[in-house]
Amino acid sequence: MLINRKDIKNLIDKIHSEGKTVVTTNGCFDILHVGHVRYLEKTKTFADYLIVLLNSDKSVRSIKGPARPINCEDDRAEILSALKCVDYVVLFDEDSPRNLLDEMKPDVYTKGADYTMETLPEADIMIKNGIKVEFIEFVAGKSTTKTIEKINQG
């Protein structure tokens, strides 16, 4: 379910008041593939609720260039929300989810295993707020970029 950013802190407070935990991850999730699904399923194993922080169209264009995203933010949010492992989706306009993570203070944050605590841009936010970080291995050969390249090759 897509939730408004202004409502996210109240939602997390409610979840915490019920003695439940929250895990978050972020991304563009432009052309959803099996690598995304496995990553999100693994992420969900770390807490009771999974909230996906989804880059808005504006954010994706800023990061990936003017030809992206392929799918608009509403479509990407709806597809993510349809996955049984995803409980909520929240959009953010910035290039990085740093501010949103600082507002939310989830229990756990996941990132791809191509990062470490030393290279994680959000590491200071994690440390400051006592947020546990889990790094998840990618599925070899699966990426939106590779999917787009394959489509362009015909």
Image: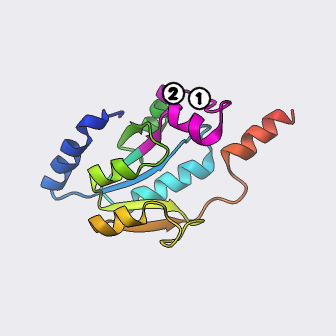
Horizontal and vertical percent for residue 47?
A: 33, 60
Horizontal and vertical percent for residue 79?
A: 50, 33
Q: Which residue is mark 2?
A: 75
Q: Are marks 1 and 2 in contact (CB under 8 Å)?
A: yes
Q: Which residue is mark 1?
A: 71
In the rendered image, the residue lying farthest to the left is: 17
Compute the Cα span from label 1 to label 2. Answer: 6 Å
Horizontal and vertical percent for residue 21?
A: 26, 58
Q: Quadrant of residue 10?
A: top left
Q: Is residue 120 magenta?
A: no
Mark 2 crowd level (few <14, some 14–19, many ≥20, 10 Å Cα): few
- Residue type at mark 2: give it: Asp
Q: Is residue 70 magenta?
A: yes
Q: Quadrant of the C terminus?
A: top right
Determine the secondary structure under disc 2: helix
Determine the secondary structure under disc 1: loop
Looking at the rendering, the stretch of residues picked out in magenta corresponds to 53-74
Which mark, residue 63?
A: none
Q: How is the image coloured?
A: rainbow
Q: Is residue 150 left or right of residue 32?
A: right
Horizontal and vertical percent for residue 70?
A: 64, 30
Instruction: Determine the residue positioned at 41% across, 38% down.
Output: 92
For residue 108, above or below residue 58: below
Q: Is residue 119 visible?
A: yes
- Residue type at mark 1: give it: Asn
Q: Quadrant of the N terminus?
A: top left
Which residue is nearer to you in this view: 63 or 9?
Answer: 63
Q: Is residue 50 visible?
A: no
